[in-house]
Image: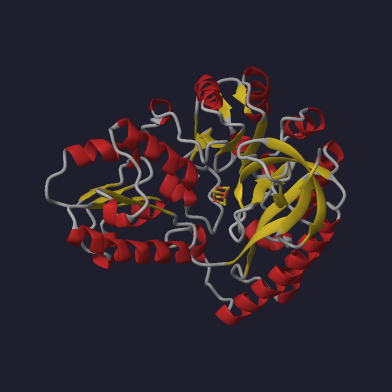
């Protein structure tokens, strides 16, 4: 979501005559779009801002903190990093070009949550020339006990499907091959009588986009109609990100996730029936308040049973103002959280490696999006399952979709050879 917002803000800046530069020393405006989902993300953003503020002293440069942390902390950010010119929350960041034009000498802090949904005015800048992010909903109504998102991004708002289709067509005209439909909970998308499966059908049939993904899904809202689309629609890429968070029903209940592990497993089984080789990824939290050893083991058992392709794994960190912060004691010692997290990471690494071995010999349709960081002569791309694959070929393939046979694999990367 932050990447999508950064793209929209880039478009808004470009529409006002700004161009991007590579080095902060060359910039007239430096913008850090921030995340609040974990304490560590905020600390990193504050560190980056402290580091970048020196360019303001040397030049006539505006330094701006925007997005979720700006929304949550407001002018408290100035106590940590004095000298910031603009602090704009999640619904105000797109106003930045206008606010710069009107700027006086005082720092400007604006965290008004009045929804201004200015998506349509700024056609998004593609993530790169071949992939684009298209926001379909903003905000979340779920209030999971640990999560700050509903507080910093507000309640759910859904965009008109016509605007979404128009935006995708604009991206296709710019050469985009793959789009990712983005929302905190895409499964609850509803605009007039169009729900998420209906929107997806429109995207698949009423645009010329070649590859479609979406993120993020909530297990409680994942419908049969959406799963069925994976049986029939080849433009829908074979990857599903379905956050589990915990394998223990008691912990899931205390997190207010509103599903049980059995329900989750049922959804996974149905997805695998619809698309047998679908890649499954998830989010997991260890050390949620009161999680005992047995309940942590349930998460490990779930990971063994489901066999995820990969997972984002975190130890619980308190987010101020959330239900868990106000009502539960953060009672799992840090060293226990860290030990559980390491055990989980080790297990998932092993499983990712095993799952990736099964890719060997398969031909995958790969969107080539760059070259290997270590060797610029090796192409890098993403398979339908969103796995990174590397292969050699002595011709320019950037932005093309090509068939690649997987030859070897580790936990993180596939290596292959292009066919033909
Ligand atoms: S569904 Fe839960 S975890 Fe996801 S954004 Fe909403 S409140 Fe946060």
At horizontal 43% and vertical 50% (from top left) the residue drawn is: 151
Residue 309 in view (yes/no): no
7 vs 192, nearest the viewer: 7
Left or right: residue 414 compared with residue 28: right
At horizontal 53% and vertical 25% (from top left) the residue drawn is: 164
Horizontal and vertical percent position of residue 350: 78, 67
Q: Quarter of the image holding residue 277?
A: top right
Left or right: residue 246 compared with residue 87: right
405 vs 199, nearest the viewer: 405
Horizontal and vertical percent position of residue 106: 14, 51
How many numbered marks appear?
0
The way the protein has been coloured in the rendering is: secondary structure
User: From what the image shows, is residue 209 above or below residue 309?
Assistant: above
55 vs 403, nearest the viewer: 403
61 vs 99, nearest the viewer: 61
Horizontal and vertical percent position of residue 355: 82, 57
At horizontal 17% and vertical 52% (from top left) the residue drawn is: 60
Q: Quarter of the image holding residue 217?
A: top right
Q: Residue furthest front?
A: 394
Quadrant containing the C terminus is top right
Left or right: residue 191 compared with residue 205: left
At horizontal 65% and vertical 44% (from top left) the residue drawn is: 218
Q: Residue furthest left?
A: 105
Residue 121 in view (yes/no): yes
Left or right: residue 321 compared with residue 147: left
Horizontal and vertical percent position of residue 219: 69, 45
Q: Quarter of the image holding residue 78?
A: bottom left
């Amino acid at each position: 979501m932050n990447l999508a917002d950064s793209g929209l803000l880039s478009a808004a800046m470009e529409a006002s005559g700004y161009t991007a530069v590579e080095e902060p020393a060359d910039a007239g405006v430096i913008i850090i779009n921030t995340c609040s989902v974990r304490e560590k993300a905020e600390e990193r953003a504050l560190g980056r801002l402290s580091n970048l503020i020196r360019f303001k002293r040397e030049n006539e440069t505006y330094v701006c903190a925007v997005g979720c942390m700006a929304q949550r902390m407001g002018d408290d950010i100035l106590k940590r990093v004095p000298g910031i010119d603009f602090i704009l929350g999640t619904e105000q960041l797109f106003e930045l070009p206008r606010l710069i034009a009107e700027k006086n000498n005082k720092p400007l802090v604006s965290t008004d949550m009045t929804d201004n949904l200015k998506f349509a005015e700024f056609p998004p800048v593609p993530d790169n020339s071949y992939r684009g992010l298209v926001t379909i909903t903003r905000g979340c109504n779920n209030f999971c006990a640990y999560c700050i998102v509903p507080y910093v991004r507000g309640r759910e708002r859904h965009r008109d499907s016509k605007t979404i289709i128009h935006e995708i067509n604009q991206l296709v005209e710019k050469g985009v091959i793959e789009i990712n439909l983005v929302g905190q909970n895409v499964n609850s998308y509803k605009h007039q009588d169009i729900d998420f499966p209906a929107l997806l059908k429109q995207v698949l049939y009423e645009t010329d986009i070649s590859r479609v993904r979406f993120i993020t899904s909530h297990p409680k809202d994942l419908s049969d109609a959406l799963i069925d689309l994976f049986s029939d629609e080849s433009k829908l890429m074979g990857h599903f990100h379905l956050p589990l968070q915990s394998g223990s029903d008691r912990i899931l209940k205390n997190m207010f996730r509103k599903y049980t592990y059995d329900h989750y497993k049922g959804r996974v089984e149905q997805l695998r029936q619809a698309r047998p080789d679908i890649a499954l990824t998830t989010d997991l939290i260890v050390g949620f308040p009161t999680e005992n050893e047995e309940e942590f083991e349930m998460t490990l058992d779930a990971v063994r049973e489901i066999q995820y392709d990969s997972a984002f794994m975190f130890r619980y960190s308190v987010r101020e103002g959330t239900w868990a912060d106000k009502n539960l004691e953060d009672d799992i010692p840090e060293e226990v959280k860290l030990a559980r997290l390491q055990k989980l990471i080790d297990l998932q690494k092993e499983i990712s490696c095993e799952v990736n071995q099964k890719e060997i010999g398969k031909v995958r349709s790969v969107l080539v999006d760059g070259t290997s960081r270590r060797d610029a002569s090796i192409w890098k791309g993403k398979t339908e399952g969103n796995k990174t694959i590397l292969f050699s070929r002595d011709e320019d393939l950037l932005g093309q979709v090509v068939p690649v046979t997987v030859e070897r694999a580790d936990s993180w990367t596939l290596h292959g050879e292009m066919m033909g």
